[in-house]
Image (cartoon, rainbow, N blue to C red):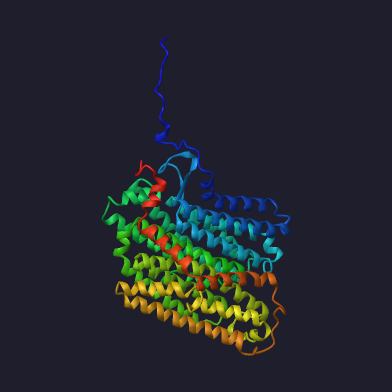
Amino acid sequence: MAATTSAPIDLSAALQLAPTPAADWLVILPPALMIGLGAVLMMLRHRIRLHAPIAIAGLAGLVLIDALLLWRVLAVGPVTMVMGRWLPPFGIAFSVDVFGAVMALVSAVVALAAAVAACTEIDDARLRYGFFPFLLLLMAGVSGAFLTGDIFNLYVWFEVLLISSFGLLILGSEREQIDGAMKYAVLNLIGTTLFLIAVGYLYAVFGTLNMADLVLKARSISGAPLMTLSCLFILAFAMKAAAFPVNFWLPASYHTPRVTVSALFGGLLTKVGIYALLRVMVMLFPLQLEELSLVVAVVAALTMLAAALGMLAQNDLRRLAGYAVIAGIGNMMAGIAVGSVAGLSGAIFYALHSMLAMTALYLVIGRAAALTGEWTLSAQGGLYQRAPGFAFVSLALFLAVAGLPPFSGLWPKIVLVKASLDIGAWWLAGSILLSGFLVTIALARVFLLVYWRPAPGPQAGEGTLPAAAFGPILALGLLIVLFGLFPEWPLSLSQEAAAGLIDPAAYLGSVFPGGGAR
């Protein structure tokens, strides 16, 4: 019998044969580390005293990894790693550029601050039911969303953070928590469903879900399918970000869990929605975003103005903070509507500022409530006399949230106002300024009533401010001050991130080094 011969198979057409550089493994380490440590804490569920030190050490490691990843991206450009050595678009890609890296780094800083603050607030019952494993799983979802290069896996990471946020929201099983969780769950599940429908439609149109491949293929298609997809994505991500008119779920739910959980949610979750909106609409569907820019601008103006009025109407400090989160979302969407490098850089800079400021705002409100024993403006007072250092840091934070100098909120607002005026959208610039003015009045009212006036009656709060509680607030405050006094670095990062979204040539080159999709 004759021997059979076969030609050698060229695996280079399908597989990445060269070994992956060691530094590129940084791309997948953040979600892998968080999932792994979460599993370790689950195995140690009967030794809850170990949860806090392990989680804090892990989150400190996450900050270091994300810092190294940002340094790597700044040094060599966008970095892509593909699972199983399969070349994109067949292999699932993790792709990170400056935008994703800087968002991941700031989110890790916020999570570390929240974990330290949790040591003084989260009781043993909530620790026993998995507070820190849920926190680490949440950060796995957030990190994965910022680093993935596949739009279906963006949906998957949304689901991961959504499931963990449900767990954090209902820890304690109080009646108010269950009510808030229902509102949170229904609206977010609707948004997630719309996102999944859009992803299915996207695959039906393009036959791929790799973001870089979608950018290349979207350039050759026009018409109704892309506009329909764009509307679906905008609606889904607007729900996630709590933009008007689908923003009512946020102040109805974020005030119900422990304030550390509220701080995490206010600092991170809505920003993931803004990130997804920027990534998908600016990079994948820029022409459709331009056509819908007026709609997005109107939504942005209504979001920030409605939220500012909501802040003025509140007596409960936690609800007031929820409306402050929504006001910031309006500012970010204004930058997306403008669509220029300046507008997008302003939106990104504002997102970085908001992640720090909203987390710190919730932590400050929680400490004020702990000192007074009350959550309402009408029942609080006298904090300046009792804790002058805390009052000083709180005032600086309020000025930052309002966008006043010399703090981090000033510069992105200046960039957004100028970018709006540059395209003739004076009404949008006016909305940003008017919203900032109303937010300033609302926070000045908080400071005057809670800190400056004498206490209206006996208060049953804590007598002292624990260092573990004040430390995270002070650390976030210092970052906010540094961003305000030295805005060049965050502004240059935001501009580079915006330029990479508008012209994703470097991002495409990292996914397809040969110059095109296979």
In terms of depth relative to the viewer, which is nearer, 174 or 399?
Answer: 399
Q: Is residue 258 visible?
A: no
**Residue drawn 65% across the image and 87% down it:** 382
**Residue drawn 69% across the image and 80% down it:** 461
Q: Residue 19 appears at what percent x and percent y?
A: 50, 38
Quadrant, the N terminus? top left
Query: Which residue sits furthest top?
Result: 1
Q: Is residue 150 above or below residue 161?
A: above
In terms of depth relative to the viewer, which is nearer, 73 or 36?
Answer: 73
In terms of depth relative to the viewer, which is nearer, 328 or 72?
Answer: 72
**Residue drawn 32% across the image and 58% down it:** 228
Left or right: residue 204 versus residue 117 is: left
Left or right: residue 311 versus residue 210 is: right
Q: Residue 211 appears at what percent x and percent y?
A: 39, 51
Q: Residue 272 appears at what percent x and percent y?
A: 48, 61
Query: Which residue sits furthest left?
Result: 223
Q: Is residue 352 above or below residue 402?
A: above
